[in-house]
Image: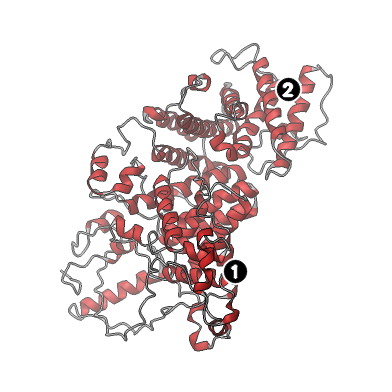
């Protein structure tokens, strides 16, 4: 058996690359047997002695009050830097990231292992690699310095009411707890830099400002706020430049890398993902700058940067809309970071023991995977991540406080899960919804494969099977996820639960909507189910608008809900008014009648009119409103003849959402 330098058994290269436990069997371990791949063992060569490197910058201790630099010291910092001292302005060399089976390294590792075995298990010498560390960080490049100054100057003050976003459908509550730690540390250890740097020092200390002046008489005390913020930025940047461990590390040590005294730009970025006050554009810009700073200073990203990329995408969708280039680019960057880090390639071993670190990685994969299907459904663009190339399992249905507590509390929570990973407490936790949405997204992926593929290789039988599996999957969800229509009329219903179950119901209906549209395109019979599904999609979405006070926590999602669910369903309802198939009410759904359709479309017109002209999808909303109004006028006023559709066109990017195709001349 090959062994490492410390005497422990050597794992095979494939298990090491996939970060799973190897059983060390030779010539082929069980993991490689199951995956039908070549099993290669490579012994790491003995490292050569290296020259001592400069010590890392010390963690910032809590300053009682910063001393501004004298003018002579400032001149030294602003002087041009020589080539030999430009480490601070040179990006950290990129690491290789996750490398899969076809990567260039696999072939070389197999060849190297063959040489190792041929030499009787002797190490094969590697070519010496030059150390390219950053060294002492002293100054940021001008562009990144401007970014850091913008971020620090726009941070919420210590006395501001930091309003943490409490959206019911988020599954990152443990980060909420981490951010509270970050905010406390930010103003206990760095507050004097930030407050005085922004000109907001404590009033009771103003009389003592002269005591901190340097001997340089024209230093003017704390007037040079940028110097103070520069010092703060250098400390945070030095922390960010340190390696960030995510493998074989306990939860508390992992948290300590970006909370407490070790604040990084990733830590500051987390504040912007939860601060729900102020200018949304500034918040989005500050979050972008934190990501850019962290990527410049780190060696290749980490799971916190990945989370920031995901949150930036969701924020950009609110600012510019889901169909905009900016949102699509942000989504692409999040997927690129996820696959670079290998968050899509986690395995589900029988001896898996969940931790905060591993469950966070599973959750962020599920969030990005689900977001991909949401954006693709709205735009009709190709999927950027596919389950065919992903192995990361569903996150477990664990409560946030259990994940954050770890230890015995987490072990007890894991033992209480059922065999499928669902909580047995009967509570609807954030991850309960995330798991269900991920399962729904996996079936949505099959529909998108058929709808967006250049070769329509789907069959009617395949679509009918997807519909059966969709209905069966929803029937197997925990009772806490069940949508109860009576809750809509109950004034004392739990609003948090209502938001989650309504969203999950809408996503379920959208899957049925897609599969029923496709079945009609594949020659299936029109049994009226598409009309029923569309009616419920419209009525559930409009309910958000008619009860805005109850759904205030998801107010920013109204436009997305409107265009993703209500508008497409409205197109089917309009077609029913123009080309009736019902005579009276639907036999199985009495609310679906001509009068019921007119009522829902009238409310939908009001909802569309409510959208502000500056909203991302305002033009599309205005077009939908004009069409629906024209259909209502035509139907209610008994106008003879046909409508003039040439001046009323609705342009959806995805043909399954474009239920207004009956307006086209060829229809």
Percent across and percent down for residue 530 are 58, 26
Residue 661 in sight here: yes
Disc 2 vs disc 1: Cβ atoms closer than 8 Å? no
- What secondary structure is found at the residue carrying circle 1? helix
Q: Residues within 10 Å of mark 1 (few under 14, many from 20)?
A: few
Q: Residues within 10 Å of mark 2 (few under 14, many from 20)?
A: some
Point out the residue furthest to the front here. 207
Residue 289 in sight here: no
- As drawn, is 118 to the left or to the right of 171? left
- As drawn, is 421 to the left or to the right of 609? left
> Could you give the CA–CA distance between mark 2 and mark 1, rounded to whole angstroms?
58 Å
Residue that appears at 45% across and 59% down: 186
- What secondary structure is found at the residue carrying circle 2? helix
Look at the image and tell me in which quarter the N terminus lies: bottom left
* Residue under label 2: 578
Label drawn at residue 146: 1
Look at the picture and state if 23 lies above or below 4. Answer: above
Mark closest to the chain's N terminus, 2 or 1: 1
Look at the picture and state if 353 lies above or below 18. Answer: above
Percent across and percent down for residue 647 are 82, 36
Percent across and percent down for residue 344 are 41, 54
Look at the image and tell me in which quarter the C terminus lies: top right
The quarter of the displayed image where residue 575 is located: top right
Label drawn at residue 320: none
Residue that appears at 29% across and 64% down: 16
């Amino acid at each position: 058996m090959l062994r490492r330098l410390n005497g422990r058994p050597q794992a095979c290269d494939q298990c090491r690359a996939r970060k799973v436990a190897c059983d060390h069997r030779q010539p082929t371990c069980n993991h490689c047997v199951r995956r039908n791949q070549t099993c290669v063992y490579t012994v790491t060569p003995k490292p050569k002695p290296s020259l001592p490197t400069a010590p890392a910058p010390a963690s910032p201790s809590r300053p009682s009050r910063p001393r501004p630099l004298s003018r002579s010291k400032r001149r030294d910092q602003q002087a041009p830097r020589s080539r030999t001292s430009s480490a601070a302005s040179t990006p950290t060399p990129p690491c290789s990231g996750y490398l899969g089976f076809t990567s260039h390294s696999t072939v070389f590792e197999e060849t190297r292992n063959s040489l190792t075995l041929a030499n009787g298990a002797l190490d094969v010498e590697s070519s010496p690699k030059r150390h390219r560390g950053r060294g002492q960080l002293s100054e940021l490049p001008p562009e990144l310095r401007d970014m850091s100054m913008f971020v620090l100057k726009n941070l919420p003050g210590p006395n501001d009411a930091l309003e943490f976003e409490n959206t019911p459908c988020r599954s990152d509550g443990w980060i909420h707890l981490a951010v509270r730690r970050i905010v406390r540390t930010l103003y206990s250890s760095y507050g004097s830099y930030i407050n005085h740097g922004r000109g907001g020092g404590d009033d009771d200390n103003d009389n003592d400002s002269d005591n901190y002046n340097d001997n340089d008489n024209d230093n003017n005390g704390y007037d040079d706020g940028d110097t103070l913020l520069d010092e703060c930025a250098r400390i945070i940047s030095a922390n960010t430049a340190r390696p960030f461990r995510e493998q074989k590390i306990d939860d508390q040590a992992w948290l300590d890398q970006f909370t407490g005294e070790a604040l990084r730009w990733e830590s500051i970025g987390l504040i912007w993902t939860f601060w729900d006050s102020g200018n949304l554009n500034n918040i989005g810009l500050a979050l972008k700058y934190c990501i850019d700073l962290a990527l410049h200073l780190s060696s290749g990203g980490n799971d916190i940067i990945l989370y920031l990329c995901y949150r930036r995408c969701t924020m950009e969708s609110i600012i510019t809309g889901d169909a905009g280039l900016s949102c699509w680019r942000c989504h692409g960057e999040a997927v690129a970071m996820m696959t670079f880090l290998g968050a899509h390639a986690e395995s589900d071993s029988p001896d898996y023991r969940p931790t905060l670190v591993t469950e966070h990685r599973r959750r962020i994969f599920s969030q990005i995977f689900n977001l991909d299907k949401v954006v693709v459904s709205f735009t009709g663009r190709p999927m950027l991540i596919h389950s065919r190339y992903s192995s990361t399992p569903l996150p477990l249905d664990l409560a946030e406080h259990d994940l954050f507590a770890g230890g015995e509390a987490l072990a007890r929570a894991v033992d209480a899960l059922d065999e499928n990973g669902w909580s047995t407490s009967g509570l609807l936790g954030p991850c309960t919804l995330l798991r269900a949405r991920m399962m729904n997204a996996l079936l949505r992926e099959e529909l998108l494969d058929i709808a967006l593929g250049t070769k329509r290789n789907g069959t009617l039988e395949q679509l009918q099977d997807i519909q059966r599996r969709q209905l069966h999957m929803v029937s197997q969800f925990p009772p806490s996820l069940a949508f109860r229509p009576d809750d809509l009329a109950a004034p004392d219903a739990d609003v948090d639960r209502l938001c989650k179950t309504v969203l999950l119901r809408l996503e379920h209906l959208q899957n049925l909507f897609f599969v029923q549209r496709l079945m009609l395109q594949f020659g299936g019979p029109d049994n009226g189910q598409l009309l029923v599904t569309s009616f419920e999609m419209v009525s559930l979405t409009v309910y958000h608008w008619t009860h805005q006070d109850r759904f205030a926590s998801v107010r920013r999602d109204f436009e997305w809900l409107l265009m993703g669910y209500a508008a497409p369903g409205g197109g089917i309802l309009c077609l029913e008014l123009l080309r009736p198939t019902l005579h009276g009410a639907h036999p199985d759904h009495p609310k679906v009648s001509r009068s019921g359709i007119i009522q829902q479309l009238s409310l939908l017109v009001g909802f569309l009119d409510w959208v502000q002209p500056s909203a991302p999808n305002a033009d599309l909303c205005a077009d939908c409103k004009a069409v629906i109004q024209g259909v209502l006028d035509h139907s209610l006023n008994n106008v003879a003849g046909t409508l003039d559709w040439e001046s009323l066109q609705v342009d959806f990017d995805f043909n399954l959402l474009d239920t207004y195709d009956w307006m086209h001349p060829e229809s």
